[in-house]
Structure formats: structure tokens, C-alpha cells
């Protein structure tokens, strides 16, 4: 906090402006400035910065603080390594931990949030889905189909983050490893599943053929899926199927 006040004052900010942005009173900022003028950083930091004095100059402190605001490190060792490469200054792990706490960073878990969805597209889909349910044939089923890779998911870890702040990690839909292509009948919740080395047009056709065998009495089978590439490449199959 003290170093931030001096850096801001040095860039032309007034005492009042610095006090407002740091949520301090004018007198406190004046005392920081007075101590800095009498002994520069050593006098300003005093015992509160014991063990770190002189390792980083005012500009380096500001640059590192800004870097940590924009980048999340999962361990103190990673921060130590960055400082050594960027500023050619060596910190111990315990020393850097103290520095991080001094500058308002805490070690906590990131917040996992879902990716943003298109609200308008969702409303349009709901409307068309309701219309389909009300107009389809009595024996015509509706399936929802999707591929999944259950061994892959976003794992929320701990990292150095400003106290009171939240950093979010978007969840993902998975990557290639175990590939499962599945579909569920919305009426009776029966499931059809295809396990394969990969999910592609051929494996999708195999799954659809399995579904078709279940509904010999149906005139049309409705399958709702996303825009994955492997769901767009079975047009020849569609010409002769339900």
C-alpha cells in the first residue's frame, strides 16, 4: 500500500486522489511521502518489509503487481521463477510468500463458471422444440444426441489472487481420450450409446442405425444435436433413413 502511494504520487497524482483510490486519509498519504523523502524505500518500508528491502525498485514493484493482477500463478515457486527471469532478482519461496501477502495477494481457489450461452438462440430453440412436440406423429420419438469425453474436464486449482477478488475458469466440453457418442429418448429416457476410438460420421451412423432399429413403427425419428462436425457429414445416410 505504501509503495503504491509513492508510485502514484510520482506519476503526478495529488495526495487527495491517492488517498481516495487507496481508501486512506490524506494525513496517512502525507506521512508516507515524508518518510520516503527522508530515507526513500528503506525508511518507508521499515520493519514491515524486512528481508525484501532493496530487492525490487518502485517501478519493478508496480510492474510485478500489475503482472500478478493479469496472470494467475498456481505456486509461489512459479512467481519466484518469473521474478528471477524478468527482473534478475532472487527471492526465496518464503520471502516471496511474504511479499505476496504484503501486496494483498492470497492463495485461494479459482471460480469455475460455464461458458456464456446465446439467450436469443436458446429462446428460439425452446419455441421450435415445443412446436415439434405438439405436431409430431404419436409414434415418432425425439432424441437428444451428444458426444462426450468424460476423462477430460476443467480442474479448478488454487493460485495467487488479490484478496477479495475472484478469478474465473471457464468449464470445457472435453478433449479426445475416451469417446462416447450417446442419445436419449426424451419420452421414456432409454439410452443408445456407441463407444469408439473416435466420434466421426461412421460412428454417428452406427448409433443412428441402432436407434432406428428400436422404432420400426415410427414414420420419422427426430434427433437433436449440436453443430459438431461429425454430425454434419452423414447426409447420404439421411436420404434412406427415418
Image (tube, helix red, strand yellow):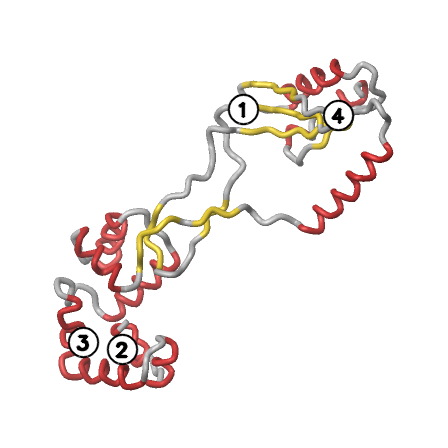
Q: Mark 4 or mark 2, which has the lower sequence index?
A: 2
Question: Residue at 83% of width from left, 16% of height from top?
Answer: 217
Q: Is residue 188 left or right of residue 28?
A: right
Which residue bears the numbered disc 1? 179
Against 133, residue 109 (above or below) is below
Circles 3 and 4, Cβ within 8 Å, touching? The answer is no
Please state the horizontal and vertical placement of residue 171, each as a whole percent of the image. Answer: 50, 42
Along the line of sight, which residue is nearer the eye, 133 or 81? 133
> How far apart in space, not on screen, are marks 2 and 3 (Cα)?
9 Å
Of callouts 3 and 1, the N-terminal one: 3
Mark 4 and mark 1 residues within 8 Å of each other at the beta carbon: no
Closer to the chain start, of discs 4 and 1, is: 1
Residue found at x 36% / y 85%:
16
In the structure shown, which secondary structural element does the residue marked by tag 2 occupy? helix
2 and 1 marks in contact (CB < 8 Å): no
Residue bearing mark 3: 44
Looking at the rendered structure, the secondary structure element under dot 4 is: helix
Residue 235: numbered disc? 4
Q: Position of residue 140 (x, y in %)?
A: 81, 24
| Distance between the alpha carbons at the discs numbered 4 and 2 | 68 Å
Q: Residues within 10 Å of mark 2 (few under 14, many from 20)?
A: many
**Relative to 57, does residue 207 appear above or below in the rendering?**
above
* Viewport quadrant of the C terminus: top right
Q: Nearer the viewer, residue 225 or 239?
A: 225
Could you say whether the residue bearing mark 1 is in a helix, strand or loop?
strand
Measured along the vertical axis of the image, is residue 225 above or below residue 200?
A: below
Left or right: 131 as drawn, with respect to 159: right
**Mark toward the viewer: 3 or 4:** 3
Q: First in sequence: mark 2 or mark 3? A: 2
Residue holding disc 2: 6
Ranked by sequence position, the earlier of labels 2 and 1 is 2
The quadrant where residue 230 appears: top right
Amino acid at each position: 500500500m505504501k509503495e503504491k502511494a509513492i508510485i502514484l504520487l510520482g506519476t503526478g497524482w495529488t495526495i487527495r486522489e491517492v488517498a481516495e483510490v487507496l481508501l486512506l486519509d490524506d494525513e496517512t498519504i502525507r506521512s508516507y511521502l515524508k518518510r520516503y523523502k527522508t530515507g526513500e524505500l528503506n525508511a518507508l518500508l521499515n520493519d514491515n518489509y524486512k528481508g525484501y528491502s532493496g530487492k525490487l525498485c518502485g517501478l519493478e514493484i508496480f510492474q510485478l503487481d500489475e503482472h500478478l493482477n493479469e496472470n494467475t500463478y498456481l505456486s509461489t515457486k512459479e512467481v519466484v521463477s518469473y521474478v528471477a527471469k524478468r527482473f534478475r532478482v532472487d527471492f526465496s519461496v518464503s520471502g516471496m510468500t511474504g511479499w505476496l501477502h504484503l501486496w494483498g495477494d492470497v492463495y485461494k481457489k479459482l471460480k469455475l463458471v460455464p461458458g456464456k450461452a446465446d439467450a436469443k438462440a436458446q429462446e428460439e430453440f425452446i419455441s421450435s422444440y415445443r412446436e415439434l412436440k405438439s405436431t409430431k406423429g404419436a409414434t415418432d420419438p425425439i432424441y437428444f444426441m451428444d458426444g462426450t469425453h468424460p476423462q477430460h474436464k476443467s480442474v479448478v486449482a488454487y493460485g495467487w489472487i488479490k484478496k477479495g477478488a475472484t478469478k474465473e475458469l471457464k468449464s470445457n466440453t472435453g478433449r479426445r481420450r475416451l469417446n462416447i457418442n450417446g442419445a436419449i429418448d426424451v419420452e421414456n429416457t432409454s439410452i443408445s450409446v456407441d463407444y469408439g476410438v473416435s466420434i466421426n460420421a461412421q460412428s454417428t451412423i452406427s448409433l443412428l442405425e441402432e436407434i432406428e432399429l428400436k422404432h420400426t413403427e415410427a414414420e420419422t425419428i427426430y434427433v437433436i444435436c449440436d453443430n459438431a462436425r461429425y454430425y454434419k457429414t452423414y447426409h447420404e445416410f439421411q436420404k434412406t433413413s427415418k
